[in-house]
Amino acid sequence: MKVDVGYCIYLPPSYEATSSAGKRFPVVYYLHGGRPGGETKSVKLTTHIDKAMHKGDVPHMIYVFVNGGKVSHYNTPQFDSMGEDVFVKELIPHIDATYRTIAKRESRGLEGFSQGGRGTTRIMFRHPDLFSSCAPGGAGHSTEKSISENNGRENENLVFAEGYNTWDLARDYARNPKPSLKILVHVGTKGFNYQNNLEYMEFLTSLKIPFGRLIVEGVPHSAGLIYEKRGLELMKFHAANFGLTSK
């Protein structure tokens, strides 16, 4: 895009202490909600992440908070924004070159909520070679289904490339589900996307795509409240997929 794009990064408590030993860490990339958003929108989740790591409840991991651009996390040339490509082709290589990451898919995770959950779902199915652990949350799959059924049209001003939605991309992945993804769909029962997430889970089941589900009772459409109540399970999900164990 030939512009500066920011990101926020959380380095675990042992990162500096192990610098001389050259210890490397797995990475979870977190995609914010909203349009547009920014790298600071979801960074408050680090309150829960940092507490869990300091207590030893989860192994130490790096978290990167992504700036998704004008139409968060999607390639939308008509709006001069290529959120997916900037993330996949530029940010990930930059993080691997700049920080002590374990730069392989087996140690790379993807997570997001709301619009970030939509982005997580699209990107994980388009790039299973990059991520092993994926946790889409609260995604608006009814909107994505409408895009699939209306030749890429979300509204009169926003039209995506054919097949560029969470339904068609899942179908594409199901035809050749390799490399395999570890998927955890999470949503609050009071969230306005709850029912369409249940529908999407049924859709994944019909495609024979394995996934786990984290249904958070009584929680509205809020990544913060989900993390407050069940965030530890999301963190442990990634850690387990990376082959890490708590002390």
Image: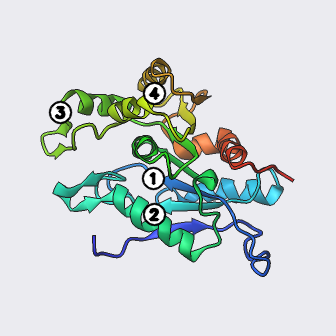
Residue 227's place in the image compared with 20, above or below, is: above
From the viewer's perspective, tell me whether residue 247 is left or right of residue 58.
Answer: right
Residue reaching furthest to the right = 247
Judging by the rendered image, the residue that carries numbered circle 3 is: 151
Name the residue: 59% across, 40% down: 226
In the structure shown, which secondary structural element does the residue marked by tag 4 occupy?
helix
Q: Nearer the viewer, mark 3 or mark 2?
A: 3
Q: Nearer the viewer, mark 3 or mark 4?
A: 3
Q: Quadrant of residue 10?
A: bottom right
Tags 1 and 4 touching, CB below 8 Å: no
Q: Earlier in the sequence, mark 3 or mark 2?
A: 2
| Front one among 10 and 75 | 75
Judging by the rendered image, the residue that carries numbered circle 1 is: 32
Tags 3 and 2 touching, CB below 8 Å: no
Q: Position of residue 60 (x, y in %)?
A: 74, 59
**Can residue 103 be seen in this snapshot?**
yes
Identify the amino acid type marked 2. Glu
Residue 211's place in the image compared with 181, above or below, is: above
In the structure shown, which secondary structural element does the residue marked by tag 1 occupy?
loop
Q: Earlier in the sequence, mark 1 or mark 4?
A: 1
Q: Earlier in the sequence, mark 2 or mark 4?
A: 2
Identify the amino acid type marked 4. Asn
Judging by the rendered image, the residue that carries numbered circle 2 is: 39
How crowded pointer 1 is (Cα within 10 Å; few <14, some 14-19, many 20+) is rated as: many
Judging by the rendered image, the residue that carries numbered circle 4 is: 197
How crowded pointer 2 is (Cα within 10 Å; few <14, some 14-19, many 20+) is rated as: many
Residues under labels 3 and 1: Cα distance? 26 Å
Identify the amino acid type marked 3. Asn
Residues under labels 1 and 2: Cα distance? 7 Å
Q: Quadrant of residue 141?
A: top left
Identify the amino acid type marked 1. His
Tags 1 and 2 touching, CB below 8 Å: yes
